[in-house]
Image (cartoon, grey):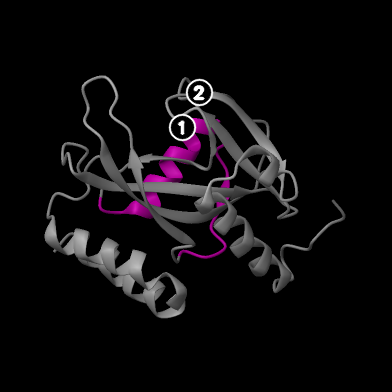
């Protein structure tokens, strides 16, 4: 089954994120119930892949001021049939930022979120079942703003709450702070 690798990743995530069981169980039920969960044509909702992109220091994250949603978010987009959601997140990161060189400090799911997307241009309101992975930008950090964004910006962890009050963005911020506090390969530099 093409959904099994994602279901396996979700099971691992579920085991280590007990405070998120309601969301994880809802996500798993959706993937199990909908063989076409990776297709944008599934109008009730679909799986998307996103990237929490960090710089060499680990204390800056690249955000997009999303054109359609008019808010600051991580980069990401539709799976369009691809069940390899990590590959989707990497593809979207490259397309939306112009950055090419990334490492994945961890191929496990970093965060997941289920959020409503409003009706727009004849596409009914629907749900995005978003899987988020950490990508470490290893080459040039000079980005290019794509047509999907009003702007891109490298933001320090302390600046992020000034740009957004979105619960899932703040949750990822706290997860990342906890992660880099325990890692020697992302030293916390003075901000």
Where is residue 157 drawn, in percent x and y?
Answer: 71, 50
The answer to whether any part of residue 88 appears in the image is: yes
Secondary structure found at label 2: loop
Give, as a single range, the part of the protein colored magenta.
83-107
The answer to whether any part of residue 3 appears in the image is: no
- Tell whether label 1 touches label 2 (CB within 8 Å): yes
Local crowd size for mark 1, using a 10 Å CA cut-off: few (<14), some (14–19), many (≥20) = some
Residue 71 position (above or below residue 27):
above
Residue bearing mark 2: 146
Mark 2 vs mark 1: in front: 2
Name the quadrant containing residue 72.
top right
Residue 103 position (above or below residue 9):
above
Local crowd size for mark 2, using a 10 Å CA cut-off: few (<14), some (14–19), many (≥20) = some
Residue bearing mark 1: 95
Which numbered marker is on residue 190? none
Where is residue 121 drawn, in percent x and y?
Answer: 26, 19
> Residue lying furthest right in this view?
190
Secondary structure found at label 1: helix
């Amino acid at each position: 089954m093409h959904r099994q690798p994602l279901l396996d990743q979700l099971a691992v995530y579920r085991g280590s994120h007990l405070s998120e069981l309601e969301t994880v169980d809802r996500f798993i039920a959706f993937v199990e119930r909908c063989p076409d969960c990776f297709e944008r044509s599934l109008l009730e909702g679909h799986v998307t892949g996103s990237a929490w992109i960090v710089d060499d220091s680990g204390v800056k994250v690249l955000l997009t001021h999303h054109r359609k949603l008019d808010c600051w978010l991580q980069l990401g987009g539709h799976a369009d049939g691809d069940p390899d959601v990590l590959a989707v997140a990497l593809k979207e990161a490259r397309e939306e930022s112009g950055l090419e060189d990334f490492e994945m400090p961890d191929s496990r799911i970093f965060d997941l979120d289920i959020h409503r997307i409003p009706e727009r241009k004849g596409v009914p309101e629907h749900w995005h079942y978003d899987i988020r992975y950490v990508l470490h930008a290893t080459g040039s950090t000079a980005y290019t703003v794509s047509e999907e964004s009003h702007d891109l910006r490298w933001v320090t962890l302390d600046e992020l709450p000034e740009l957004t009050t979105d619960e899932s963005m703040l949750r990822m911020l706290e997860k990342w702070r906890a992660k880099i506090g325990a890692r020697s390969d992302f030293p916390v530099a003075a901000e």
